[in-house]
Image (tube, rainbow, N blue to C red):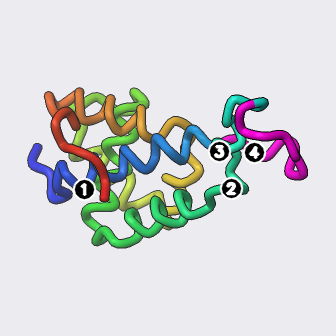
Amino acid sequence: MELTISLEDVCRIVLRAREYDAQVPAVDPDDSSNMADDKAVDVLEDSSNTSVEEELRSMIEDLNDDEQVELYTLMLIGAGDYDPAEWDEALATVTDEIPDIPDALMRTPMLASLLETGLAAFGLDCDGMGTAG
């Protein structure tokens, strides 16, 4: 298996997906406590940082069609839906059955973890890739 999508691109998406996965719905949008009192948990509320969602979606949408298919396929392998030996079959299924890959990926819980597990299935990882920027 040789990826069209660069490992660097996958790892940047993993970093943003990790941030996106960490956000939680705003519990108290009118909270007037200070950061010391609430242990700064407000920063995890999605209403305070929609730019992470927008940036992640943009990163995925900027990939060409083949790269999007590979990214989704890595996620499926990470989820255990396919074995790494079934890469070609999984690619064909994604190509035929997933019309809006960016939207489907954005709705995937734990996307970062699934992508990392998919990479690990092929002996790849994001160690030493630095930070997104």
Disc nearer the start of the sequence (2/1): 1
Give the number of the mark in front: 2 or 1: 2
Label 1: how many residues lie within 10 Å, few (<14), some (14-19) or many (20+)?
Answer: some
In terms of secondary structure, where does tag 3 sit?
Answer: helix
Residue 43, numbered label: 3
Q: Residue drawn 67% across and 36% down?
A: 40
Amino acid on which the number 4 mark rests in the picture: Pro
Give the number of the mark in front: 2 or 4: 2
Residue 54 visible from this viewpoint? yes
Find disc 4 in the rendering and name its residue.
25
Q: Residue drawn 44% across and 69% down?
A: 58
Would residue 98 be found to the left or right of residue 86 on screen? right
Cα–Cα gap, marks 2 and 4:
10 Å
Give the number of the mark in front: 4 or 1: 4
Disc nearer the start of the sequence (4/1): 1
Q: Residue drawn 38% across and 41% down?
A: 75
- Residue 105 % position (x, y): 49, 52
CB atoms at circles 1 and 3 under 8 Å apart? Answer: no
Residue 85 visible from this viewpoint? no
CB atoms at circles 2 and 3 under 8 Å apart? Answer: yes
> Which one is nearer the viewer's eye here, 122 or 85?
122
- Residue 38 % position (x, y): 76, 31
In terms of secondary structure, where does tag 2 sit?
Answer: helix
Disc nearer the start of the sequence (1/3): 1
Residue 48, numbered label: 2
CB atoms at circles 2 and 1 under 8 Å apart? Answer: no
Amino acid on which the number 2 mark rests in the picture: Ser
In terms of secondary structure, where does tag 1 sit?
Answer: helix
Residue 9, numbered label: 1
What range of the chain is rendered magenta? Answer: 24-36
